[in-house]
Image (cartoon, rainbow, N blue to C red):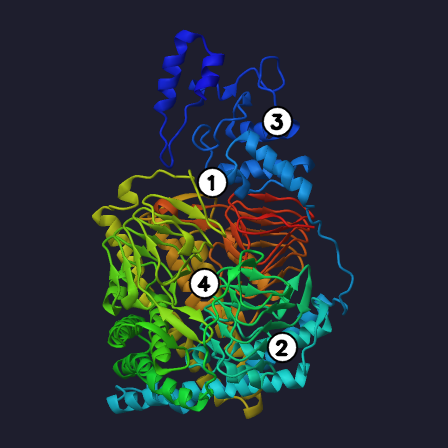
Amino acid sequence: LRAALAAELPPALVPAAIAAIDAIPRSVGGKVDRRRLPAIVDSRGPGLPGTWPMSDTERQVAAAIADVLGMPGAVHPDADFFDDLGLDSLTVAMVVSRLRANPRTRAANVRMTYEHRTVRTAAAAIDGATGRRTTEVVRERTDAVGRPMPTAMACAQAAVLATLVVVGSQLLWMPDLARLALRDGNVTVIDALMLACVAVLAVPAWAVATLALAALAKWTIIGRYRPMRVHAWSWWHMRHWTVVRAASIVPWGLLETAGLAPAALRLLGARIGRNVHIHAGVRLSEGGWDLLTLEDGATIGQDASLRVIDLDAGCIEAAPVTVRRNATVETRAGMSGGAELGEGSILRPLSNLSAGEARAFAVLDGVPAVPVGEAPRLHVPDEPSPWVLRALAATALAAPSLAITALPWTLAVAWIGGRWHSPGIVVAAVAAAAATTVLLQGVLARLLGPPPDGRVSLHGIAALRMAAQSALVESSGRWLSGTLMWPRWLRLAGARIGAGCEISTVTDVLPHAVTIGPETFFADGIYLGGPTLRAGSAVIDRIKLGASCFVGNHAVLPGGTRLAAGTLVGISTSAELVADEPGSSWFGHPPFRLPRREVVEAPRELTHAPSAIRRLNRWCWEVARFGLPAVPVLVGVAWFDVLSGLEGRLTAAEFRLVALPCTTAATAAVLVAACIAMKWALVGRVRPGTHPLWSCWCSRWDFLYVAWGMWAAVPLSFLEGTLMLPAVLRLFGCRIGRRALLGPGFAHVVDPDMLRFGDGVTVQALMQAHTFEDRVLKIDHVHVRDGATVGANAVLLYGADVGERANVAPHSVVMKRERLEPGTAYEGVPTQPAAG
């Protein structure tokens, strides 16, 4: 660059220009005054005499950068994208999007710009990628069977839901028990203790009953699942959806925590070997169980995704997934239909294994996963699986947790007695019960003690104790995550948390093994310090984070992670390979360094050091969470009062078959309507913009999301897989086209106003329409155009735009402001055009 200055400027001006360049900030967020850099930008424009000679590809890259940065001329081919031109993580994605619109530079991707940081080297990389790979064009498949009948299926689904309401309402109507709680005068403490015992005993009974119902529905309606591709909204889809709805009411989380999920899967037709371990969070209710094979010693990690049933381009695909003997699928990793993980192999966190057979004893990593090394050959004892003893041990460990959950609520009933019609008393009682439950869960988590050192069997008592501790953290997190109370609760449970930390949802946490420095910020869905699983065993190691770290959504911080002060770990990134360097920023799979990222400046009093009135405002909104269950309670009381009045005036048939189910359905509708009304009252129509952490808007926005989870998520979950759910989501502010096929999870949406889906889309992704870097919420629209497909666990960041008929592979990440070209397939973290 200095030589270029000497060639371009009069000699007298060279020292001043060099001094100006030396004064340019090199830190994250530094601004570059491009008017002082005549050697970087030639104002005479590209192609004019005297400008630098460039190839066609180099000229395209330079023009895209000049367009994004608003430069009037040509960019020097050897100028550094980040240090000289001032590109950051946002503008890089915009440059790449412009390059993809040109067939000559369609192979460009975000990772390439970080690995090749000048116009000249980036153009060479694009030319090389274009020469060795062909961008995959999405072609319509014609092998699907079944005839789509969306109108007929909607009517049939409505009939099935009506039947569920009729049957379920009969189980809910227990007037004698309700009158005991609603009678004049207080319920005695003995009555409350008896109710708590009934509640504790009802949980395993409910698990057995619902599992039996799911098995009956599966074997009666579907029989045995076979590999096939079926059009959505066909008759087979209707049968499959009915089975999934029956399976969704099974308490799978309880079965996973107790280690009984393998036995449940065998009942549904899966081939499960001995000593199989299934960690918490694995979605097991999506059907296709006959196509799942887990051989002896197979280990499935936290939130792993075994997609024997998948959605693609308006179709449902059923294909086998096989995990061979002693193989391991790690945290949040996934396997697509047709994938086979070889014996003793390891699929690393956040990776996705595509269809095909993986060799034995391989370590696989990436999206899509490829072999990166050899897996260690561990000695795995062939122990008999003592599932009966595990069930007894799990019951003994679960009983205290269930008791401390049931007891405060039944004591609240005893305190309220006949005062149900006083809303203030109901709110106070509900809030006290919720707060007491959370406090007792923290105490119990601490009493469970630190995890054992070294390697432990996943089939022993120690593993059950760790699972119970993680379950307590997750249960309390539903109330406290993202609040000022959450770090305090984690300290109570045994973690070491510095002052000023902001922590949202954390998963698979063993609190005693966690140390977090002051002013660290965690986004949602962080996997924090979980055990490293290997072929039926677990290794626990401490995790230590320095001060002022930032960890993005769905990042994995496995046991043993060490992060230096000021480290940023981006969305869907594993920290295992992140360098322990202060102030560094990392993103991707595998992770790469971000030399410069987008920074939104905000006053420190809105991000770190708020005034007293802002602290009071936030405390009020966060404490108000404990009163949210009072609304369902009061609605339930009204439901009982209405039915009590109707019972004596109607015949038994009229009451049981008409009044009871209609009133029950109306009660669920009231809760959903109340949530919709709250949305428009608290935040209105949300528009793209920025909001500092300590703003009142952020508090209202967060309160709305928690209320949605407590009031409307359960009723809306029964509408998943139907065309009725998009209709309800439109009332919340979503813009969803016709015949949208949405995967699980859309019953609870964070940013409904930001979702813009076209006609005929197929979406199973996680919509990350906001981020919280630098403690400033940045929010913008996410577009999925007509006919596009976004695979399971893919993440679409704010400003992402998926073109018509484009296909985003599972577990991929679409960057902020990144545009994907129509009719093209993409994969990876960050995305790149898939190989043809």
Whole-Å distance between the Cαs marked 2 and 3?
A: 56 Å
Which mark is nearer the camera, 1 or 2? Answer: 1
Q: Secondary structure at mark 2?
A: helix
Q: Is residue 215 above or below residue 442?
A: below
Residue sitting nearer the eye, 459 or 442: 459
Question: Label 2 belongs to which residue?
Answer: 242
Q: Secondary structure at mark 3?
A: helix
Which mark is nearer the camera, 1 or 4? Answer: 1
Q: Secondary structure at mark 1?
A: helix
Dot 2: few (<14), some (14–19), or many (≥20) neighbours within 10 Å? many
In x, y percent, where is residue 290? Answer: 63, 79
Counting residues from the N terminus, which is met first, the one under dot 2 or under dot 4? 2
In x, y percent, where is residue 261? Answer: 49, 80
In x, y percent, where is residue 640? Answer: 43, 82
Residue sitting nearer the eye, 670 or 14: 14
Whole-Å distance between the Cαs marked 1 and 4?
A: 36 Å
* Residue type, numbered disc 4: Cys
Please tell me which residue is depicted at 58% across the width and 64% down the height of the picture.
743
* Residue type, numbered disc 2: Thr
Labels 3 and 4 touching (C-beta < 8 A): no
- Furthest toward the left, the residue is 612
Whole-Å distance between the Cαs marked 3 and 4?
A: 53 Å
Whole-Å distance between the Cαs marked 1 and 2?
A: 44 Å
Question: Label 4 belongs to which residue?
Answer: 675
In the visual, does 634 lie left or right of 311? Answer: left
Please tell me which residue is depicted at 53% across the width and 38% down the height of the picture.
113
Question: Label 3 belongs to which residue?
Answer: 59
Q: Which mark is residue 89?
A: 1
Q: Does residue 89 appear anywhere in the picture?
A: yes
